[in-house]
Protein backbone atom coordinates (compact mmCIF):
# COMPACT_ATOMS: atom_id res chain seq x y z
CA UNK A 1 0.00 0.00 0.00
CA UNK A 2 1.09 3.55 -0.60
CA UNK A 3 -0.20 7.05 -1.14
CA UNK A 4 -0.04 9.59 -3.90
CA UNK A 5 -0.72 13.19 -2.97
CA UNK A 6 -1.74 15.53 -5.78
CA UNK A 7 -0.80 19.12 -5.06
CA UNK A 8 -1.98 22.08 -7.14
CA UNK A 9 -0.10 25.34 -6.68
CA UNK A 10 0.03 28.84 -8.10
CA UNK A 11 2.95 27.81 -10.32
CA UNK A 12 2.44 24.18 -11.24
CA UNK A 13 1.45 20.74 -9.98
CA UNK A 14 3.46 18.43 -7.77
CA UNK A 15 2.95 14.75 -7.05
CA UNK A 16 4.17 13.37 -3.73
CA UNK A 17 4.39 9.62 -3.22
CA UNK A 18 5.24 7.41 -0.28
CA UNK A 19 4.64 3.97 1.14
CA UNK A 20 2.21 3.28 3.96
CA UNK A 21 4.59 4.61 6.59
CA UNK A 22 4.43 8.04 4.97
CA UNK A 23 7.88 8.98 6.22
CA UNK A 24 9.97 9.08 3.04
CA UNK A 25 8.51 10.95 0.11
CA UNK A 26 9.33 11.31 -3.56
CA UNK A 27 8.46 14.62 -5.16
CA UNK A 28 7.65 14.91 -8.86
CA UNK A 29 7.18 18.26 -10.52
CA UNK A 30 6.57 20.95 -11.30
CA UNK A 31 4.16 19.70 -13.90
CA UNK A 32 2.74 22.51 -16.05
CA UNK A 33 5.37 24.82 -14.60
CA UNK A 34 4.32 28.43 -14.27
CA UNK A 35 0.59 27.75 -14.59
CA UNK A 36 -2.00 27.92 -11.84
CA UNK A 37 -3.23 24.45 -10.98
CA UNK A 38 -6.46 24.96 -9.10
CA UNK A 39 -7.20 21.26 -8.76
CA UNK A 40 -6.11 17.75 -9.66
CA UNK A 41 -8.13 14.69 -8.83
CA UNK A 42 -7.91 10.98 -9.59
CA UNK A 43 -10.75 8.72 -10.64
CA UNK A 44 -11.99 6.44 -7.84
CA UNK A 45 -12.65 3.83 -10.53
CA UNK A 46 -9.13 4.04 -11.99
CA UNK A 47 -6.65 5.84 -9.72
CA UNK A 48 -4.12 6.19 -12.52
CA UNK A 49 -6.59 8.35 -14.42
CA UNK A 50 -6.02 11.88 -13.12
CA UNK A 51 -7.56 15.11 -14.32
CA UNK A 52 -6.00 18.54 -13.83
CA UNK A 53 -7.21 22.09 -14.24
CA UNK A 54 -4.40 24.27 -15.62
CA UNK A 55 -5.06 27.97 -16.03
CA UNK A 56 -3.39 31.30 -16.51
CA UNK A 57 -4.43 34.92 -16.50
CA UNK A 58 -2.74 35.23 -19.88
CA UNK A 59 -3.76 32.09 -21.71
CA UNK A 60 -6.95 30.98 -20.02
CA UNK A 61 -8.03 27.44 -19.30
CA UNK A 62 -6.27 24.25 -20.32
CA UNK A 63 -7.34 20.79 -19.16
CA UNK A 64 -4.99 17.86 -18.75
CA UNK A 65 -5.46 14.14 -18.27
CA UNK A 66 -3.04 11.44 -17.21
CA UNK A 67 -3.61 7.73 -17.70
CA UNK A 68 -0.51 6.63 -15.82
CA UNK A 69 -0.77 8.20 -12.41
CA UNK A 70 0.68 11.55 -13.39
CA UNK A 71 3.84 10.44 -15.17
CA UNK A 72 2.65 11.66 -18.57
CA UNK A 73 -0.15 14.04 -19.47
CA UNK A 74 -2.21 14.89 -22.50
CA UNK A 75 -4.28 18.02 -23.07
CA UNK A 76 -8.02 17.41 -23.34
CA UNK A 77 -10.96 19.64 -24.22
CA UNK A 78 -10.86 23.12 -22.75
CA UNK A 79 -14.06 24.58 -24.15
CA UNK A 80 -16.59 25.49 -21.48
CA UNK A 81 -19.55 27.18 -23.15
CA UNK A 82 -22.57 28.06 -21.08
CA UNK A 83 -25.78 26.50 -22.26
CA UNK A 84 -28.03 28.89 -24.17
CA UNK A 85 -28.13 32.59 -23.34
CA UNK A 86 -25.99 32.90 -20.22
CA UNK A 87 -27.98 35.67 -18.55
CA UNK A 88 -26.68 37.68 -15.63
CA UNK A 89 -25.71 37.42 -12.00
CA UNK A 90 -25.04 40.21 -9.52
CA UNK A 91 -21.78 42.12 -9.83
CA UNK A 92 -19.87 43.52 -6.87
CA UNK A 93 -21.67 46.85 -7.24
CA UNK A 94 -25.09 45.21 -7.35
CA UNK A 95 -25.58 45.61 -11.09
CA UNK A 96 -26.40 42.66 -13.39
CA UNK A 97 -23.29 41.13 -14.92
CA UNK A 98 -23.14 38.58 -17.74
CA UNK A 99 -21.91 35.11 -16.90
CA UNK A 100 -18.33 34.76 -18.16
CA UNK A 101 -16.21 31.62 -17.92
CA UNK A 102 -12.91 32.18 -16.09
CA UNK A 103 -11.53 28.88 -14.83
CA UNK A 104 -12.19 25.42 -13.47
CA UNK A 105 -11.95 25.33 -9.70
CA UNK A 106 -12.91 21.76 -8.93
CA UNK A 107 -12.88 18.42 -10.73
CA UNK A 108 -14.91 15.51 -9.40
CA UNK A 109 -14.54 12.24 -11.29
CA UNK A 110 -17.54 9.92 -11.13
CA UNK A 111 -17.26 7.10 -8.55
CA UNK A 112 -17.83 4.44 -11.20
CA UNK A 113 -16.66 5.69 -14.59
CA UNK A 114 -13.20 7.13 -15.27
CA UNK A 115 -14.49 8.95 -18.35
CA UNK A 116 -17.21 10.84 -16.49
CA UNK A 117 -16.13 13.94 -14.61
CA UNK A 118 -17.92 16.94 -13.17
CA UNK A 119 -16.28 20.35 -13.23
CA UNK A 120 -17.14 23.31 -11.02
CA UNK A 121 -16.26 26.58 -12.68
CA UNK A 122 -16.11 30.34 -12.23
CA UNK A 123 -18.47 32.08 -13.06
CA UNK A 124 -20.43 29.52 -11.13
CA UNK A 125 -21.73 26.62 -13.14
CA UNK A 126 -21.32 22.88 -13.35
CA UNK A 127 -20.09 21.03 -16.41
CA UNK A 128 -19.88 17.34 -17.18
CA UNK A 129 -17.86 15.19 -19.55
CA UNK A 130 -18.66 11.59 -20.39
CA UNK A 131 -15.82 11.07 -22.87
CA UNK A 132 -12.79 11.49 -20.68
CA UNK A 133 -12.68 15.25 -20.98
CA UNK A 134 -12.79 15.78 -24.73
CA UNK A 135 -16.14 17.57 -24.52
CA UNK A 136 -17.77 19.40 -21.65
CA UNK A 137 -21.47 20.21 -21.39
CA UNK A 138 -23.07 22.46 -18.84
CA UNK A 139 -25.71 21.10 -16.49
CA UNK A 140 -27.84 24.21 -16.91
CA UNK A 141 -30.39 23.39 -14.24
CA UNK A 142 -28.06 24.71 -11.56
CA UNK A 143 -27.53 28.15 -13.05
CA UNK A 144 -31.17 28.07 -14.06
CA UNK A 145 -32.17 27.76 -10.42
CA UNK A 146 -34.48 30.71 -9.89
CA UNK A 147 -31.97 32.39 -7.61
CA UNK A 148 -29.19 32.57 -10.22
CA UNK A 149 -29.64 36.27 -11.07
CA UNK A 150 -29.16 37.05 -7.35
CA UNK A 151 -25.84 35.22 -6.93
CA UNK A 152 -22.98 37.55 -6.17
CA UNK A 153 -19.23 36.84 -6.31
CA UNK A 154 -17.19 36.51 -3.15
CA UNK A 155 -13.77 38.12 -2.98
CA UNK A 156 -12.31 35.15 -4.87
CA UNK A 157 -14.90 35.31 -7.62
CA UNK A 158 -18.26 33.64 -8.26
CA UNK A 159 -16.82 30.15 -8.12
CA UNK A 160 -18.33 26.70 -7.85
CA UNK A 161 -15.54 25.25 -5.74
CA UNK A 162 -16.92 22.11 -4.14
CA UNK A 163 -18.62 19.04 -5.60
CA UNK A 164 -19.51 16.11 -3.35
CA UNK A 165 -21.09 12.99 -4.85
CA UNK A 166 -23.14 10.59 -2.71
CA UNK A 167 -21.32 7.30 -3.34
CA UNK A 168 -24.43 5.26 -2.53
CA UNK A 169 -26.59 7.25 -4.91
CA UNK A 170 -24.45 9.12 -7.46
CA UNK A 171 -27.49 10.96 -8.79
CA UNK A 172 -27.41 12.91 -5.53
CA UNK A 173 -24.71 15.57 -5.51
CA UNK A 174 -23.95 18.56 -3.35
CA UNK A 175 -22.15 21.65 -4.56
CA UNK A 176 -21.11 24.95 -3.01
CA UNK A 177 -20.72 28.36 -4.57
CA UNK A 178 -19.10 31.48 -3.17
CA UNK A 179 -21.10 33.48 -2.43
CA UNK A 180 -24.40 31.82 -3.23
CA UNK A 181 -24.38 28.86 -0.86
CA UNK A 182 -24.97 25.13 -1.04
CA UNK A 183 -27.20 23.29 -3.50
CA UNK A 184 -28.29 19.68 -3.94
CA UNK A 185 -29.48 17.65 -6.89
CA UNK A 186 -31.26 14.30 -6.58
CA UNK A 187 -31.53 13.63 -10.30
CA UNK A 188 -27.95 13.67 -11.54
CA UNK A 189 -27.77 17.42 -12.01
CA UNK A 190 -30.94 18.21 -13.95
CA UNK A 191 -32.64 20.11 -11.15
CA UNK A 192 -31.22 21.72 -8.03
CA UNK A 193 -32.44 23.23 -4.81
CA UNK A 194 -30.75 25.54 -2.39
CA UNK A 195 -29.94 23.83 0.93
CA UNK A 196 -29.02 26.73 3.17
CA UNK A 197 -31.61 26.57 5.92
CA UNK A 198 -29.91 27.14 9.24
CA UNK A 199 -27.00 29.12 7.82
CA UNK A 200 -26.70 32.59 9.22
CA UNK A 201 -24.37 35.14 7.64
CA UNK A 202 -24.04 38.62 9.07
CA UNK A 203 -22.45 39.93 5.88
CA UNK A 204 -25.65 39.83 3.84
CA UNK A 205 -28.76 41.97 4.25
CA UNK A 206 -30.97 39.06 5.29
CA UNK A 207 -28.73 36.87 7.46
CA UNK A 208 -30.78 33.70 6.88
CA UNK A 209 -31.62 34.25 3.23
CA UNK A 210 -32.20 31.32 0.88
CA UNK A 211 -29.00 32.18 -1.06
CA UNK A 212 -26.07 34.54 -0.64
CA UNK A 213 -24.02 32.60 1.93
CA UNK A 214 -20.29 32.32 1.48
CA UNK A 215 -19.83 28.58 1.89
CA UNK A 216 -16.13 27.76 1.82
CA UNK A 217 -16.13 23.97 1.78
CA UNK A 218 -18.31 20.91 2.38
CA UNK A 219 -17.08 17.46 3.43
CA UNK A 220 -18.78 14.08 3.76
CA UNK A 221 -17.89 10.65 5.07
CA UNK A 222 -18.80 8.12 2.37
CA UNK A 223 -20.51 5.78 4.83
CA UNK A 224 -22.97 8.48 5.90
CA UNK A 225 -23.81 10.54 2.86
CA UNK A 226 -26.63 12.44 4.52
CA UNK A 227 -24.28 13.94 7.10
CA UNK A 228 -22.33 16.90 5.80
CA UNK A 229 -19.87 19.22 7.47
CA UNK A 230 -19.35 22.76 6.26
CA UNK A 231 -16.77 25.44 6.83
CA UNK A 232 -18.63 28.62 6.11
CA UNK A 233 -16.96 32.03 5.86
CA UNK A 234 -17.58 32.21 9.57
CA UNK A 235 -19.07 29.17 11.38
CA UNK A 236 -18.53 25.44 11.16
CA UNK A 237 -21.85 23.80 10.38
CA UNK A 238 -23.35 20.32 10.22
CA UNK A 239 -26.42 18.73 8.70
CA UNK A 240 -27.78 15.26 9.45
CA UNK A 241 -30.51 15.36 6.84
CA UNK A 242 -28.74 15.94 3.53
CA UNK A 243 -28.84 19.69 3.88
CA UNK A 244 -32.49 20.16 4.80
CA UNK A 245 -31.28 21.97 7.91
CA UNK A 246 -27.91 22.99 9.30
CA UNK A 247 -26.76 23.68 12.82
CA UNK A 248 -23.64 25.33 14.04
CA UNK A 249 -20.97 23.09 15.62
CA UNK A 250 -18.19 25.65 16.07
CA UNK A 251 -18.25 24.95 19.82
CA UNK A 252 -14.98 25.83 21.52
CA UNK A 253 -12.99 26.74 18.40
CA UNK A 254 -10.86 29.83 19.07
CA UNK A 255 -12.17 31.31 15.80
CA UNK A 256 -14.67 29.70 13.47
CA UNK A 257 -13.47 31.44 10.33
CA UNK A 258 -11.58 29.19 7.93
CA UNK A 259 -11.57 27.51 4.57
CA UNK A 260 -10.72 23.81 4.72
CA UNK A 261 -12.64 20.98 6.39
CA UNK A 262 -12.43 17.22 6.06
CA UNK A 263 -13.59 13.97 7.70
CA UNK A 264 -11.44 11.10 9.00
CA UNK A 265 -11.44 8.13 6.62
CA UNK A 266 -12.69 5.60 9.17
CA UNK A 267 -14.34 7.68 11.89
CA UNK A 268 -17.36 9.54 10.51
CA UNK A 269 -17.61 11.76 13.58
CA UNK A 270 -13.97 12.86 13.48
CA UNK A 271 -13.52 16.08 11.56
CA UNK A 272 -10.70 18.54 10.96
CA UNK A 273 -10.56 22.29 10.39
CA UNK A 274 -7.79 24.88 10.35
CA UNK A 275 -9.11 27.99 12.07
CA UNK A 276 -8.04 31.26 10.50
CA UNK A 277 -8.08 34.47 12.49
CA UNK A 278 -10.71 36.41 10.56
CA UNK A 279 -12.04 37.42 7.18
CA UNK A 280 -9.69 40.39 7.21
CA UNK A 281 -6.63 38.58 8.57
CA UNK A 282 -6.16 35.35 6.64
CA UNK A 283 -3.64 33.62 8.89
CA UNK A 284 -3.71 31.48 12.04
CA UNK A 285 -4.31 33.01 15.45
CA UNK A 286 -1.21 34.10 17.37
CA UNK A 287 1.15 32.89 14.63
CA UNK A 288 0.44 29.26 15.64
CA UNK A 289 -0.50 26.80 12.92
CA UNK A 290 -3.06 24.55 14.56
CA UNK A 291 -5.38 21.93 13.11
CA UNK A 292 -8.44 21.41 15.26
CA UNK A 293 -10.00 17.97 15.50
CA UNK A 294 -13.41 17.07 16.82
CA UNK A 295 -14.14 13.44 17.59
CA UNK A 296 -17.75 14.19 18.36
CA UNK A 297 -18.88 15.54 15.02
CA UNK A 298 -18.32 19.11 16.13
CA UNK A 299 -18.81 21.28 19.23
CA UNK A 300 -15.86 19.79 21.15
CA UNK A 301 -12.53 20.54 19.51
CA UNK A 302 -8.91 19.87 20.39
CA UNK A 303 -5.87 21.65 19.01
CA UNK A 304 -3.34 19.50 17.13
CA UNK A 305 0.07 21.12 17.21
CA UNK A 306 2.69 18.38 17.35
CA UNK A 307 5.10 19.07 14.51
CA UNK A 308 3.39 22.25 13.33
CA UNK A 309 5.01 25.69 13.71
CA UNK A 310 3.85 27.35 16.92
CA UNK A 311 5.36 30.77 16.41
CA UNK A 312 5.66 33.33 13.62
CA UNK A 313 3.44 31.39 11.23
CA UNK A 314 1.23 33.54 9.02
CA UNK A 315 0.19 31.27 6.19
CA UNK A 316 -3.32 30.41 5.05
CA UNK A 317 -4.86 27.04 4.23
CA UNK A 318 -7.21 27.36 1.28
CA UNK A 319 -10.51 25.56 0.80
CA UNK A 320 -9.30 22.76 -1.51
CA UNK A 321 -6.04 22.25 0.34
CA UNK A 322 -6.94 19.53 2.87
CA UNK A 323 -7.42 15.83 2.27
CA UNK A 324 -7.34 12.42 3.94
CA UNK A 325 -6.06 9.10 2.68
CA UNK A 326 -7.83 5.81 3.34
CA UNK A 327 -4.95 3.75 4.74
CA UNK A 328 -5.56 1.78 7.93
CA UNK A 329 -4.03 4.58 9.97
CA UNK A 330 -5.74 7.54 8.34
CA UNK A 331 -3.38 10.13 6.92
CA UNK A 332 -4.39 13.78 7.00
CA UNK A 333 -2.80 16.32 4.66
CA UNK A 334 -2.95 20.04 4.13
CA UNK A 335 -1.07 22.61 2.10
CA UNK A 336 -0.40 26.23 2.89
CA UNK A 337 -0.02 29.47 1.01
CA UNK A 338 3.58 29.39 2.26
CA UNK A 339 4.27 26.32 0.14
CA UNK A 340 4.37 23.66 2.84
CA UNK A 341 2.47 20.39 2.58
CA UNK A 342 2.02 18.71 5.95
CA UNK A 343 1.11 15.10 6.64
CA UNK A 344 -0.08 13.38 9.75
CA UNK A 345 0.07 9.60 9.27
CA UNK A 346 -1.86 8.97 12.47
CA UNK A 347 -5.06 10.95 12.16
CA UNK A 348 -3.65 14.24 13.38
CA UNK A 349 -1.50 13.40 16.40
CA UNK A 350 1.90 13.94 14.77
CA UNK A 351 2.64 16.22 11.83
CA UNK A 352 5.60 16.77 9.59
CA UNK A 353 6.23 18.77 6.45
CA UNK A 354 6.62 16.68 3.30
CA UNK A 355 7.82 19.77 1.41
CA UNK A 356 8.59 23.24 2.70
CA UNK A 357 9.03 25.52 -0.25
CA UNK A 358 6.50 24.93 -3.00
CA UNK A 359 4.60 27.84 -4.54
CA UNK A 360 1.40 28.76 -2.67
CA UNK A 361 -0.73 25.61 -2.42
CA UNK A 362 -4.20 25.76 -3.93
CA UNK A 363 -5.33 22.16 -3.62
CA UNK A 364 -4.38 18.83 -2.06
CA UNK A 365 -5.89 15.43 -2.84
CA UNK A 366 -4.72 12.07 -1.47
CA UNK A 367 -4.98 8.75 -3.27
CA UNK A 368 -4.54 5.44 -1.48
CA UNK A 369 -2.90 2.99 -3.85
CA UNK B 1 5.56 30.60 -45.26
CA UNK B 2 4.60 32.71 -42.29
CA UNK B 3 6.72 32.48 -39.18
CA UNK B 4 5.06 32.74 -35.77
CA UNK B 5 6.90 33.15 -32.49
CA UNK B 6 4.90 31.91 -29.51
CA UNK B 7 5.43 32.80 -25.85
CA UNK B 8 7.22 30.17 -23.77
CA UNK B 9 4.09 28.75 -22.11
CA UNK B 10 2.38 28.19 -25.44
CA UNK B 11 5.50 26.64 -26.97
CA UNK B 12 5.48 24.16 -24.10
CA UNK B 13 1.79 23.48 -24.59
CA UNK B 14 2.19 22.97 -28.33
CA UNK B 15 5.39 20.96 -27.76
CA UNK B 16 7.49 23.07 -30.10
CA UNK B 17 10.96 24.34 -29.29
CA UNK B 18 11.23 27.20 -31.70
CA UNK B 19 9.14 29.42 -33.91
CA UNK B 20 6.53 27.69 -36.06
CA UNK B 21 6.08 28.03 -39.82
CA UNK B 22 2.61 28.06 -41.31
CA UNK B 23 1.17 27.94 -44.78
CA UNK B 24 -1.75 30.36 -45.00
CA UNK B 25 -4.21 30.10 -47.85
CA UNK B 26 -5.57 33.34 -49.30
CA UNK B 27 -4.97 36.75 -47.72
CA UNK B 28 -2.55 36.61 -44.83
CA UNK B 29 -4.57 38.34 -42.18
CA UNK B 30 -4.14 38.00 -38.43
CA UNK B 31 -7.29 35.85 -38.31
CA UNK B 32 -6.06 33.61 -41.12
CA UNK B 33 -2.73 33.05 -39.38
CA UNK B 34 -4.44 32.22 -36.08
CA UNK B 35 -6.82 29.87 -37.91
CA UNK B 36 -3.83 28.06 -39.42
CA UNK B 37 -2.01 28.02 -36.08
CA UNK B 38 -4.98 26.50 -34.25
CA UNK B 39 -5.56 23.98 -37.04
CA UNK B 40 -1.96 22.79 -36.71
CA UNK B 41 -1.94 22.92 -32.91
CA UNK B 42 -5.50 22.38 -31.62
CA UNK B 43 -4.24 22.56 -28.03
CA UNK B 44 -3.80 26.31 -28.55
CA UNK B 45 -7.52 26.82 -29.16
CA UNK B 46 -8.84 29.13 -26.47
CA UNK B 47 -5.42 30.18 -25.22
CA UNK B 48 -4.87 33.13 -27.60
CA UNK B 49 -8.43 34.06 -28.46
CA UNK B 50 -11.90 33.00 -27.36
CA UNK B 51 -13.13 29.67 -28.73
CA UNK B 52 -16.35 31.09 -30.11
CA UNK B 53 -16.05 34.86 -30.52
CA UNK B 54 -12.35 34.80 -31.50
CA UNK B 55 -11.88 37.86 -29.33
CA UNK B 56 -8.22 38.25 -28.34
CA UNK B 57 -7.53 37.33 -24.73
CA UNK B 58 -6.88 40.46 -22.72
CA UNK B 59 -3.22 39.78 -21.91
CA UNK B 60 -2.16 38.54 -25.34
CA UNK B 61 -0.58 40.89 -27.86
CA UNK B 62 0.35 40.61 -31.55
CA UNK B 63 3.51 42.39 -32.69
CA UNK B 64 5.24 42.42 -36.09
CA UNK B 65 7.81 44.66 -37.70
CA UNK B 66 8.02 46.67 -34.48
CA UNK B 67 4.31 47.51 -34.61
CA UNK B 68 1.40 46.47 -32.41
CA UNK B 69 -1.45 44.82 -34.32
CA UNK B 70 -3.34 43.78 -31.20
CA UNK B 71 -6.08 46.32 -31.60
CA UNK B 72 -6.47 46.04 -35.36
CA UNK B 73 -9.48 44.24 -36.83
CA UNK B 74 -8.67 40.55 -37.32
CA UNK B 75 -9.09 40.83 -41.08
CA UNK B 76 -6.29 43.41 -41.35
CA UNK B 77 -3.63 42.17 -43.82
CA UNK B 78 -0.28 41.54 -42.19
CA UNK B 79 2.80 43.44 -43.43
CA UNK B 80 4.51 42.15 -46.55
CA UNK B 81 7.61 41.28 -44.56
CA UNK B 82 5.53 38.87 -42.47
CA UNK B 83 3.81 37.42 -45.53
CA UNK B 84 7.16 36.67 -47.17
CA UNK B 85 8.63 35.22 -44.01
CA UNK B 86 11.26 37.91 -43.68
CA UNK B 87 9.83 38.92 -40.31
CA UNK B 88 7.90 36.79 -37.78
CA UNK B 89 4.54 37.49 -36.20
CA UNK B 90 5.08 37.67 -32.46
CA UNK B 91 2.38 36.35 -30.13
CA UNK B 92 3.27 37.92 -26.81
CA UNK B 93 2.08 37.47 -23.26
CA UNK B 94 1.65 41.00 -21.98
CA UNK B 95 4.06 42.02 -19.26
CA UNK B 96 2.32 41.74 -15.93
CA UNK B 97 3.40 40.61 -12.52
CA UNK B 98 2.70 37.31 -10.82
Image: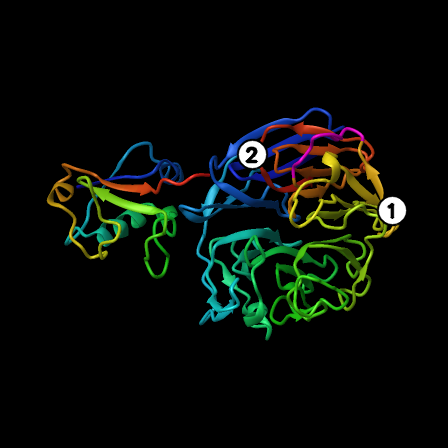
Q: In which quarter of the image is the N terminus of chain A?
A: top right
Q: Which range is magenta?
A: A306-315
Q: Circle 2 sits on which residue?
A: A359
Predominant secondary structure, magenta span: loop
Q: Circle 1 sits on which residue?
A: A295
In the visual, does A21 lie left or right of A204? right
In this rendering, is residue A288 above or below A44?
above
Instruction: Return the chain for callout 1.
Output: A
Measured as percent of width and height from the top left, residue A47 is found at 63, 43
CA neighbours of label 2 inside 10 A, class few (<14), some (14 to 19), many (20+): many
In this rendering, is residue A135 above or below A63?
below
Tags 1 and 2 touching, CB below 8 Å:
no
Based on the displayed image, in which of its 4 quarters is residue A310 positioned?
top right
Instruction: Return the chain for callout 2.
Output: A
Task: Examine the structure image and report whether residue B66 is included in the region drawn in magenta.
Answer: no
Point out which mark residue A91 bears: none
- Whether labels 1 and 2 belong to a single chain: the reply is yes
Based on the displayed image, in which of its 4 quarters is residue A40 positioned?
top right
Q: Which of marks 1 and 2 is in front?
A: 2
Task: Examine the structure image and report whether residue A308 is included in the region drawn in magenta.
Answer: yes
Q: Which of A311 and A113 is in front in this view?
A: A311
Residue at 62%, 64% (x, y): give it.
Answer: A180
Q: Nearer the viewer, residue B72 or A105?
A: B72
CA neighbours of label 1 inside 10 A, class few (<14), some (14 to 19), many (20+): some
Residue at 86%, 52% (x, y): give it.
Answer: A299
Measured as percent of width and height from the top left, residue B14 is found at 37, 40
Amino acid sequence: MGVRVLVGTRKGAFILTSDERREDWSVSGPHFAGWEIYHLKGSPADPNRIYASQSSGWFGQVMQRSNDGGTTWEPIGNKFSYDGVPGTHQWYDGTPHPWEFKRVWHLEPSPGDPDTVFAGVEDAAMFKTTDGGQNWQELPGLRGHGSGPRWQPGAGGLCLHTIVIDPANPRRMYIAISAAGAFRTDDGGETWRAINRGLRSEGIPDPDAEVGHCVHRIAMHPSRPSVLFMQKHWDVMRTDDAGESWREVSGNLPTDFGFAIDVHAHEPETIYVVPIKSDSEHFPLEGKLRVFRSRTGGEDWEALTNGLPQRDCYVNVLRNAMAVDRLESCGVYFGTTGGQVYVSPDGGNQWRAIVHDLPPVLSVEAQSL
Amino acid sequence: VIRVVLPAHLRTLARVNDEVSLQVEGRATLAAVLDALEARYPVLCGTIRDHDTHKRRAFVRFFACEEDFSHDPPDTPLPEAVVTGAEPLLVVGAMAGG
